[in-house]
Amino acid sequence: MALVAASILSCDFGRMKEEIEFLDEQKVDYIHVDVMDGHYVPNLTFGPPIIKAIRPYTEIPFDVHLMIENPENSIDQYIDAGSDRITIHNDATIHLHRLIHKIKEAGVKAGVSLNPHQSPKEIEYVLKDLDLVLLMSVNPGFGGQSFIPSTLDKVKELKELLQKHNSSAEIIVDGGVNQNTGKELVEAGADALVAGSYIFNAENRSEAIESLRNL
Ligand code: DX5
Ligand code: ZN
């Protein structure tokens, strides 16, 4: 069993309401919202006004993934827009510990994301504070990229570190997830899987969601 976070990066932006209503019917565990600023990653998506506009279409938790520089400057807007979980990248802000606690004090779950070259050891001393750790299994910025296999060892390493620090943070993996890579990830110890193109480009989207859920 895996928790499924459907990434709306690959949905039809012109039909955002219908796409979210579909995910609502499918009862996915999270709606994964990829915020990109064109600086931290070479792509630009959407920000707080869009998140606020789509928030009423479902009660499924919004898992907001901030791929933005200096998220401390705009974090209040993402909190106010109705994010249930906010994940920041560990190298996007100087005072990571401070920002994690600011998010949590606002009653929002806090996550930190690591890029493919980054070790879980970099965030060892905040693991106890986190609700989730999001491992990027592609370089962030675009949907539809191929899964980077070294993520599997990283999931195992992170799991051990979480146990060492008695942290109950969820391990969620993002990028290139499909039924095959998803199976390997769950076997390695992942709790949740983000999937964009695998769901939205599928001939049968419901089956694609189900195939991840049943891993
Ligand atoms: C990539 C994003 C992912 C993206 C995944 O930077 O963080 O959430 O939507 O897309 P797929 O599942 O197509 O790899
Ligand atoms: Zn993402």
Image: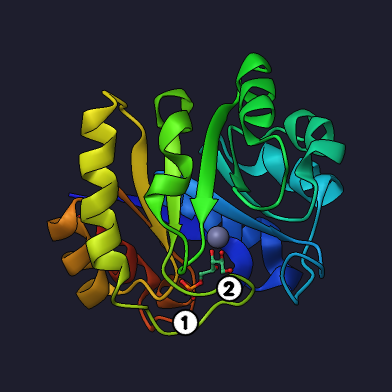
Q: Secondary structure at mark 1?
A: loop
Report if the CB atoms under discs 1 and 2 are less than 8 Å apart. Answer: yes
Q: Residue at x 31, y 26 (%)?
A: 167
* Residue at mark 2: C-beta within 8 A of ligand 1: yes
Q: Quick one: 16 or 126, which is closer to the camera?
A: 126
**In the depicted structure, whether residue 33 falls above or below residue 48:** below
Separation (CA) of disc 1 from disc 2: 8 Å
- Residue 204: x and y in percent read 35, 77
Q: Give the colour scheme of this rendering.
A: rainbow
Q: Position of residue 50 (x, y in %)?
A: 80, 51
Task: State the SS at label 2.
Answer: helix
Residue at 24%, 51% (x, y): give it.
157
**Residue 146 visible:** yes
Q: Reply above or below: 200 against 156.
A: below
Residue at 20% across, 42% down: 160
Mark 1 sits on what residue? 201
Residue 88 percent across, percent down from the top left: 63, 45
The amino acid type found where label 1 is placed reads Asn
Residue at 73% x, 42% y: name it. Answer: 94
Question: Residue 145 appears at what percent x and percent y?
Answer: 48, 83
Image height of 140 relative to 215, above or below: below
Which sits in the foreground, 136 or 60?
Answer: 136
Is residue 132 toward the left or the right of residue 186 in the image?
right
Q: Quadrant of residue 63?
A: top right
Q: Quadrant of ligand 2?
A: bottom right
Label placed on residue 78: none
For mark 2, what is the residue?
10
* Location of residue 175 (image quadrant): bottom left
Q: Is residue 190 visible?
A: no
Name the kind of residue labelled 2 in the image. Answer: Ser
Q: Nearer the viewer, residue 193 or 134?
A: 134
Circle 2 packing at 10 Å, graded few (<14), some (14-19), many (20+), is some
